[in-house]
Image (tube, rainbow, N blue to C red):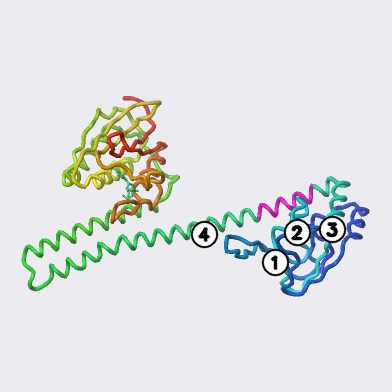
């Protein structure tokens, strides 16, 4: 059991002021489970707990779920928000044990605040502190819920993407191992298994890249941009050829150095060209263009495919956004964006007047050779 003065806000009050507040204060008793006030009640005063335990909760969400924000014991103050803005209560207070509170009417407090700026300051500090605590708690919970939702989506997406190739591998292995299998059937089974293993390994790479997160220890070293582009085109040659895709340069990449992590930048070329090849099922063309502008090198990757569908155009670079692909993970472009932003550049996409997709990314330049 405590006196109302035990709350820090009322300490150091001049004795006369304290006596006046005490005279206006009334004690109210509640049984366990009894509502002290609820949402919508008049905010006619504040309470300091004399003894017992009080739970503060608010209604959240469209379902009207009750969320407990705090449990307070003797000496704690509650109900102060409505007292300041003279609005109805926005939370409920329920006694969780036999509880006695000091109820201090709004009028008495307003008068004391008028007479003592110091008291007003202390009350305001107390309220701000409480708001901050609620804010932190709320942000933490929202973040945690979002993280869990993301992990759930991520796991579902990966499991979904692994099931299909694993099924094919199972069937192909049975076929290749059957006693009646001909050498062609064995070869066919082997090819199918190899293809699915490549698919799984591409998926695993995407997941590893995606979960790597934005790294603050990410090191950028001077890299010759033209060499990097040539390496990318060389590496992509075979894959594009298989897909009947021709790669063309509109102009030579500039001989400048960019601060880069080459392996990761190469990945951007791989992802963009891989997507373009997938979009151009019967083959087509990918054109690379380069421009130097405002100390940045601007690269455009343009294809002759059907262009980006309006369904995904607005959130193309968001993780898990995929459209029109049975095996899409929706991670490729979000990884591209992260890599380009880690290189202090920007990436955008749109469709060309001819109808194909065009991706544009910028990279800061270190200085011409
Ligand atoms: P995924 O390729 O696994 O679906 P991405 O993040 O790489 O994931 O791409 C997201 C979506 O953007 C694709 O599903 C596709 O609909 C669209 N897209 C990407 N590149 C192109 C392109 N070159 N042409 C048309 N659509 C594209």
Q: Residue at x 74, y 53 (%)?
A: 87
Between circles 4 and 3, the one closer to the viewer is 3
Q: Which residue is mark 3?
A: 105
Ligand 1 within 8 Å, label 4 CB: no
Near mark 3 (Cα within 10 A), the count class, few <14, some 14-19 or many ≥20, is some
Q: Is residue 225 above or below residue 62?
A: above
Q: Which residue is mark 2?
A: 79
Q: Are marks 2 and 1 in contact (CB under 8 Å)?
A: no
Near mark 1 (Cα within 10 A), the count class, few <14, some 14-19 or many ≥20, is many
Q: CA distance from mark 4 to mark 3?
A: 39 Å
193 in the magenta segment: no
Q: CA distance from mark 4 to mark 2?
A: 28 Å
Q: Which residue is mark 1?
A: 55
Mark closer to the chain start, 2 or 1: 1
Q: Residue at x 78, y 51 (%)?
A: 123
Where is residue 4? Give x, y as percent: 83, 62
Mark closer to the chain start, 1 or 3: 1
Q: CA distance from mark 2 to mark 1?
A: 12 Å
The quarter holding residue 74 reads: bottom right
């Amino acid at each position: 059991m405590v006196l109302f003065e035990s709350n820090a806000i009322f300490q150091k009050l001049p004795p006369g002021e304290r006596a006046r507040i005490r005279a206006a204060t009334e004690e109210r008793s509640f049984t366990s489970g009894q509502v002290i006030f609820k949402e919508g009640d008049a905010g006619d005063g504040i309470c300091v707990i004399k003894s017992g335990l009080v739970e503060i909760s608010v209604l959240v969400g469209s379902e009207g779920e009750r969320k407990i924000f705090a449990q307070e014991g003797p000496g704690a103050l509650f109900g102060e928000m409505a007292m300041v803005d003279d609005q109805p209560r926005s939370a409920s207070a329920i006694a969780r044990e036999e509880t006695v509170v000091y109820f201090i009417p709004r009028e008495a407090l307003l008068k004391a605040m008028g007479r003592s700026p110091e008291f007003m300051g202390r009350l305001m500090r107390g309220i701000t502190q409480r708001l901050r605590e609620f804010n932190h708690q709320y942000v933490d919970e929202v973040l945690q819920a979002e993280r869990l939702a993301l992990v759930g989506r991520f796991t579902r997406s990966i499991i979904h993407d692994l099931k299909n190739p694993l099924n094919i591998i199972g069937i192909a292995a049975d076929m290749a191992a059957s006693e009646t299998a001909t050498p062609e059937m064995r070869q066919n089974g082997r090819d199918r298994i190899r293809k699915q293993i490549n698919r799984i390994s591409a998926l695993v790479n995407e997941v590893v890249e995606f979960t790597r997160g934005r790294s603050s220890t990410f090191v950028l070293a001077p890299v010759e941009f033209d060499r990097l582009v040539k390496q990318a085109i060389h590496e992509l040659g075979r894959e594009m050829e298989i897909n009947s895709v021709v790669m063309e340069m509109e102009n030579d990449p500039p001989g400048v150095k960019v601060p880069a992590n080459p392996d990761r930048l190469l990945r951007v070329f791989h992802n963009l060209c891989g997507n373009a090849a997938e979009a151009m099922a019967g083959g087509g063309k990918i054109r690379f263009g380069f421009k130097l502008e405002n100390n940045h090198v601007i690269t455009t990757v343009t294809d002759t495919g059907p262009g980006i569908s309006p369904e995904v155009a607005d959130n193309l670079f968001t993780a898990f956004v995929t459209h029109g692909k049975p095996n899409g993970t929706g991670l490729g472009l979000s990884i591209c964006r992260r890599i380009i932003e880690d290189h202090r550049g920007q990436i955008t996409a749109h469709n060309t007047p001819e109808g194909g997709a065009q991706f544009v990314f910028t990279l800061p330049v270190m200085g011409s050779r």
